[in-house]
Image (tube, rainbow, N blue to C red):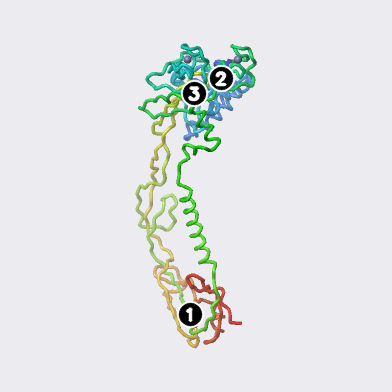
Amino acid sequence: MSQDQIRQIQQLISAGRFAEARAILQSIDRPDIPQLLAQLDAMERAAAAAQPQPVTQTESTADYLNRLDDTGGEAAAAAGPATPAPEAPRHSRKGELTGTDAEGRRIYYEGTYEMLWDCQYCGTKKLLGKTHRFCPNCGAAQNPDSRYFPSEEEQIAVEDHVFVGADITCKSCGTLNSGNAEFCGNCGSPLTDSARARTQAEQVRGAGEHFASSGSRDIAKERFDAEMERVGVRPKAGKKGLPRWAIALIIGLVVLLCGGVLVSTLWTKEAGVVLTGHSWERTIFVEQYGPVNENEWCSSMPGGAYNVSRRQEIQSYRQVPDGEDCQMVRVDSGDGTFRTEQRCQTRYRDEPVYADRCYYTIDRWSDSRTARSSGSSQSDAPYWPELNLNCEGQTRAGCERERNREGRYVLILHNTDENKEYTCEVTQERWQSAPLESRWQLQVGGVMGDARCDTLEPAR
Ligand SMILES: [Zn+2]
Ligand SMILES: [Zn+2]
């Protein structure tokens, strides 16, 4: 199987054209073809079943091609998620799908063009990055740092461009050499540890816009600025923000606020109090059996429901593909050219999924009333309210049963020092055994003066 075939199959799979990929596979004579065909079937089913994550699909494509590849992994690397590195592995055709990036966007190749550069020595402008390795006016070698993107209107295409790596500047004589050169074409020095050309940041534009030139570079000024920044003479560009005093003020306020909250919850002081009163309240909660209106998805409606009416309602949302969002991106290849790519992401919209909702009546136990008794002194001993349950012990419409009983026992405490009154709920035992006029102590909040009833204990 040739590299070309592998590449072709890879593209067809990425584009979802499984039938054509299958036809090519079937034309190849290899013992493991049936196995590979089965894997292709599985990938097609997975792609058809749900909306597969584009990235995982690419990974499985990579695995798949790894197995196809006799030479071991080259094609898989080409199919893997593209890194932002400016390497274009080979010569592509316009509009061709070349892979997927880390965010799952499909990358279409749109062409290769010349970067521009300006001669630092004689001032000649808009020289071509690939064609003019030397200034045609004064003969100075091209400095790759001076390259910039042209405007879209004046960009010059490079036909049949083959990428061989970013250019290398000879460290002995400063001549710019092609990325695959081993020795300097000018002085013959080995290029093994010489500097690769730095690349410019990507340019991005939306549909319907035009790329502007990234602008001529003033290398001397950039170098001067970088040096000034390094020694700290100039504040770093793009690091504008709030002045320091404002940041300090904000931090101070936040600390103050947090501290205030902490103090008001944690800081307490002890208060001596006198018990001046008792109160109690007892409640019984009563349920009644009878018709209740409910609604539920019809598939999980309980048995025993009656008067059922159903209607269609939105149960959930499903993501369905709805066109794609594309961006044009210019990527500096580092060899005097840049390539333009279209990066596209499938757009999804939420489509409602409907199901039957059932509205029904059902007989159940539900809260109907409460019975309450209360008292305001210890001598008025707590008792449960009188309760007459309708047809107790039976389960039919109108019958009643007890759900729950609750009792609350409250001590009324007076802080003579500050002339403040607190109420604390305690157990019935403590309530019963606490005599009037007895002395107690408890913690109260240092800020709000609120009683912390869990600290209440008899005075020592
Ligand atoms: Zn020149
Ligand atoms: Zn050289």
Q: Secondary structure at mark 1?
A: loop
Q: Are marks 2 and 1 in contact (CB under 8 Å)?
A: no
Q: Nearer the viewer, residue 254 or 140?
A: 140
- Quadrant of image for the C terminus: bottom right
Residue, far front: 233
Q: Residue 314 at what x, y percent from top left?
A: 38, 46
Quickly name the residue at label 2: 165
Q: Residues within 10 Å of mark 3 (few under 14, many from 20)?
A: many
Q: Is mark 3 within 8 Å of ligand 1?
A: no
Question: Residue 391 location in percent, x, y?
Answer: 43, 74
Q: CA distance from mark 2 to mark 1?
A: 85 Å
Mark found first going from the N terminus, 3 or 2: 2
Q: Residue at x 47, y 36 (%)?
A: 237
Q: Which mark is residue 332?
A: 3
Q: Is residue 290 above or below residue 412?
A: above
First reached walking from the N terminus: tag 3 or tag 1? 3
Determine the secondary structure under disc 3: strand
x, y percent for residue 206: 39, 30
